[in-house]
Image (cartoon, helix red, strand yellow):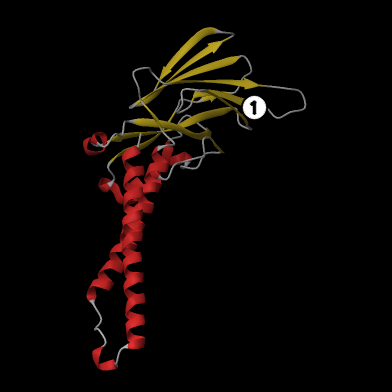
């Protein structure tokens, strides 16, 4: 996903580099001619050189932006036919800080296990979800998601706005660059970026939670001693 932007960044970079090389060669030749030519016969300054310089710089900047976009997209997992899931459990050991165990599937469909120490009795997982506009879908992008962190929940009225966008513990590199970018440019962003919070997860050693991610929300199933106890759709 995002291969188009990798190719675009490569083409833009070398195009910009080519423009700057042409400018360099042109200036070098002009300096050489000026050293061997009378002042009355020297060539006049050309606006073509300035235009190529500006174009080269713009193309390289666009290439960097396209490559950044490609890297950010690579941090997400596309929604496929199977419903994406994650499991949350807790590990308590003597003389050690309690840890949350999060099991997910990464971009390569490999099992990923993360152990995170925590100090709160109630936590929520933050999940970024992007729904791309049609023009981006034509370019190969798919609606996608990523878990960005663990948020401590202080009350039932906590929301994304009240918890802030910075998790208490970052996961998978923390929040992506798309969140502040979409907030800055608004409707100019080629999709919809949302940060969803799961229902609160109670930190108890005998509890196991299963989360299912969708484009419009997160469902949470709680099991006690491997027996399904309750289901909490968001």
Q: Which class describes the residues within 10 Å of circle 1: few (<14), some (14-19), or many (20+)?
A: some
The outermost residue toward the right is: 95
Q: Quadrant of residue 101?
A: top right
The percent position of residue 153, horizontal first and vertical second, equals 52, 32
Which residue is more in the foreground, 131 or 27? 27
The structure residue drawn at horizontal position 48% and vertical position 27%, both measured from the top left corner, is: 106
The outermost residue toward the front is: 36
The structure residue drawn at horizontal position 39% and vertical position 47%, both measured from the top left corner, is: 67
Local SS, label 1:
strand
The percent position of residue 120, horizontal first and vertical second, equals 61, 31
Drawn side of residue 23 relative to residue 117, left or right: left
Which residue is more in the foreground, 6 or 94? 6
Drawn side of residue 111 relative to residue 40, left or right: right
Give the vertical position of 77 relative to 165 (above or below).
Answer: above
Which part of the image, by quadrant, shows the N terminus? top left
The percent position of residue 59, horizontal first and vertical second, equals 31, 58
Q: Which residue is mark 1?
A: 99
Drawn side of residue 169 relative to residue 55, left or right: right
Which part of the image, by quadrant, shows the C terminus? top left
């Amino acid at each position: 996903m995002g291969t188009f932007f990798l190719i675009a960044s490569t083409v833009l970079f070398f195009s910009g580099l080519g423009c700057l090389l042409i400018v360099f060669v042109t200036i070098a030749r002009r300096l050489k001619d000026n050293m061997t030519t009378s002042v009355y016969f020297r060539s006049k300054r050309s606006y073509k050189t300035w235009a190529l310089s500006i174009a080269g710089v713009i193309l390289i900047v666009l290439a960097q932006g396209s490559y950044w976009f490609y890297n950010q997209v690579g941090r997400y997992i596309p929604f496929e036919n199977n419903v994406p899931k994650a499991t949350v459990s807790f590990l308590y050991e003597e003389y050690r800080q309690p840890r949350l165990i999060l099991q997910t599937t990464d971009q390569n469909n490999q099992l990923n296990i993360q152990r995170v120490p925590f100090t709160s009795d109630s936590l929520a997982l933050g999940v970024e979800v992007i729904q791309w506009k049609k023009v981006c879908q034509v370019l190969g992008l798919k609606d996608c998601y990523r878990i960005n962190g663990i948020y401590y929940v202080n009350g039932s009225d906590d929301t994304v706005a009240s918890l802030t966008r910075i998790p208490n513990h970052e996961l998978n590199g923390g929040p992506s660059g798309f969140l502040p970018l979409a907030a800055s440019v608004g409707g100019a962003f080629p999709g919809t970026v949302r940060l969803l919070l799961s229902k609160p997860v109670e930190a108890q050693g005998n509890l196991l939670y299963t989360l299912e991610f969708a484009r419009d929300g997160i469902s949470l199933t709680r099991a006690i001693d491997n027996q399904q106890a309750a289901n909490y759709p968001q």
